[in-house]
Image: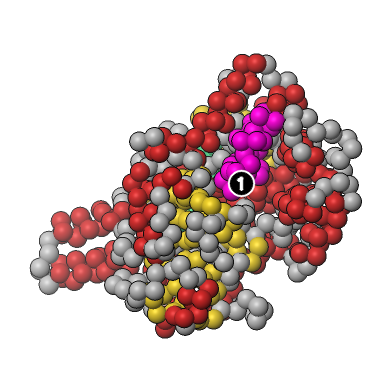
Amino acid sequence: MAFSATTRQQNIERLQNETLDLLVIGGGITGAGVAIQSTAMNMKTGLIDMQDFAEGTSSRSTKLVHGGIRYLKTFDVGVVADTVKERAVVQGIAPHIPKPDPMLLPIYDETGATFDLFSVKVAMDLYDKLAEVKDPKFTNYTLSREEVLQREPQLNPKHLVGGGVYLDFRNNDARLVIENIKKAHENGGIMASHVKATGLLHDDDGRINGITAEDLLTGASFEIHARIVINTTGPWSDTIRKMDHTEKYQSQMRPTKGVHLVVDAEKLPVPQPTYFDSGDQDGRMIFVVPRENKTYFGTTDTDYHGDLKHPTVTQEDVDYLLEIVNRRFPTAKITLDDIEASWAGLRPLIAANGSSDYNGGNSGKISDKSFKEVIKVVDQFESQEASREDVESVLNDLETSLAEDKLSPSAVSRGSSLTSSPDGLLTLAGGKITDYRKMAAGAMALIAKILADKYDAHFNEINSKNLPVSGGDIDPHNVDATIAFYAKQGTDNGLTNDEALRIANMYGSNAARVFSLIGKVEPTHGLSLAETISLRYALDEEMTLTPVDYLLRRTNHLLFMRDTLDSLKDGVIATMADYLGWDAATVKAQTELLNQTIAESDLTALKQG
Ligand SMILES: Cc1cc2nc3c(=O)[nH]c(=O)nc-3n(C[C@H](O)[C@H](O)[C@H](O)COP(=O)(O)OP(=O)(O)OC[C@H]3O[C@@H](n4cnc5c(N)ncnc54)[C@H](O)[C@@H]3O)c2cc1C
Ligand SMILES: O=P(O)(O)OC[C@H](O)CO
């Protein structure tokens, strides 16, 4: 179903002229998850994003669908319970995207270790129990020191006491977003990228009834009217809430930056995703993940106060990660020059989330630390050891919800929150990619209630656990065989087995639409047949507007296939120029943008000192 640059223009027209039931601001995984459900309920839904879909945090994650086993350490069982159960749900609605990939967790006997051999087994058993993992292929187990070193001989043997292996899933974060957006479009949603919300509109009763917006490609400003507006802008959530001049605004977000670095797999060969303590007693755990013929590792977790649109990788981030990885893999000797790609993202953490208040509204809970402070100061007041002012300052500290900023970034819960301002702006923020479906279901329950109560508008119930994304019409229990079956259509039409499998894995049940382009579109500008049909599909059906959209977010080529990128990029630009009718100036600008993005990813500036 066409979802192209032309569709974008048509949708902007419609957004200006039609009143919506629901407008979603933000096309990352949170907004996309709301849009697929609201459109499945037949709500007239619009979604805008000021960038490309998933250009925010949702293309900058560790690219896992996982329950966050480390959160058990901060007793965030609520978050883990939600997310680890959601793994199987996400795999069920997007079978071609998250793939099971058991994680190896080496255990070191050192100060501040998150787990020891006993607690890791308890955590893994709880993790499997919460997720109802029963398949012996995937249930957890522990390894002796020797067995861990047999698997990963490069690991530092010093203080290594053994390890655990438990199920988690690798993911393609940006692909999960676009497949939700495409399905929402197929359901009748009105989606447009590069459209920015610039202000909030209110009706005569002071209720939010729309936004002012700007088409960032043309500069045109316009209004979008909707019965309900939901703010799903992740790290930008406060920015949208601040637009609401009628409400006493209180910041709730605490974005923290996470960085990943990519090296060739030969530099750091790991047979499976590996997860260990930083060893710096900072509460951080570091992932080392094989992907294509590369290995990526991360992440940092530092409070961030910079440009939300453009978090960058600094020398400090590189030094931090290289020091840890070279200490854990002492023979790897990775240097800045070995880094082929990188990315930086911002966790949309909720500042007051010392304890998780998961899905469905702020439980008003505070962290155990803050709770103990309140009890202590009240106790002291009772026995005349503290004044009223002492009590008030502790409570005031909590009320400003900044109380939790004393928590280290890694101790802040990854829980989500759903709030409604008095004038009706909904904000769904925080959480993880892994539980986006559950977060959206929580929001949809509230949205359906508001539409029924306020507008007597009633919509069909859905079970979002059975709502496949675009490309997800695959039996989740028979993925490999189905992908192989799809790939055959490619090899039968002249593609190599690798090319056909790559397309089948990328597009799932939409692979047939991609392969059907063979014979209809001829390779041009030096592109292979496989790249030609993949790019054409991205242009026709994935609202791909720039070479960066295609090479970074629709295909991840820029991150995990750096070796072939240079031979590809000119052909991609030229083919897009033909398709989109670019003039010379636009070709130049897009070429510069792509080269800038590549230089930023491979840390050219840092390498040049
Ligand atoms: C380093 C790191 C690693 C992570 N790893 C994982 C992981 O492996 N697994 C996991 O489950 N979770 C992980 N997470 C968490 C997960 O990535 C985030 O919770 C999730 O991506 C947030 O999605 P979102 O849609 O809320 O925000 P975003 O993806 O940031 O989307 C918000 C969107 O709003 C748009 N926007 C902002 N302002 C406006 C405006 N005025 N008008 C229109 N649009 C606007 C932005 O352009 C953006 O696209 C990780 C996060 C980080 C930072
Ligand atoms: O939540 P954190 O801080 O463990 O970081 C995100 C991970 O990198 C993957 O979810």
> What is the chief secondary structure element of the magenta stretch?
helix
Q: Could you tell me which quadrant the C terminus lies in?
A: top left
Q: Is residue 272 visible?
A: yes
> Residue 151, percent across and down?
53, 73
For residue 77, side relative to residue 559 (left or right): left
Residue tagged 1: 561
> Residue 54, percent across and down?
59, 43
- Residue at 78%, 30% in the rendered image: 524
Given residues 581 and 263, the one toward you in this image is: 263
- Asked if 322 appears above or below 313 in the picture, the reply is below
* Residue type at the position of mark 1: Met
- Farthest-out residue, top: 584
Q: Could you tell me which quadrant the N terminus lies in?
A: top right
> Residue 21, percent across and down?
67, 41
Q: Is residue 231 visible?
A: no
Given residues 334 and 393, the one toward you in this image is: 334
The secondary element bearing badge 1 is classed as loop
- Asked if 589 appears above or below 367 in the picture, the reply is above
Reply yes or no: does residue 569 show up in magenta.
yes
Callout 1 environment at 10 Å: few (<14), some (14 to 19), or many (20+)? some
- Residue at 54%, 69% in the rendered image: 103
Give the colouring mode of the picture.
Answer: secondary structure
Magenta-highlighted residues: 545-573
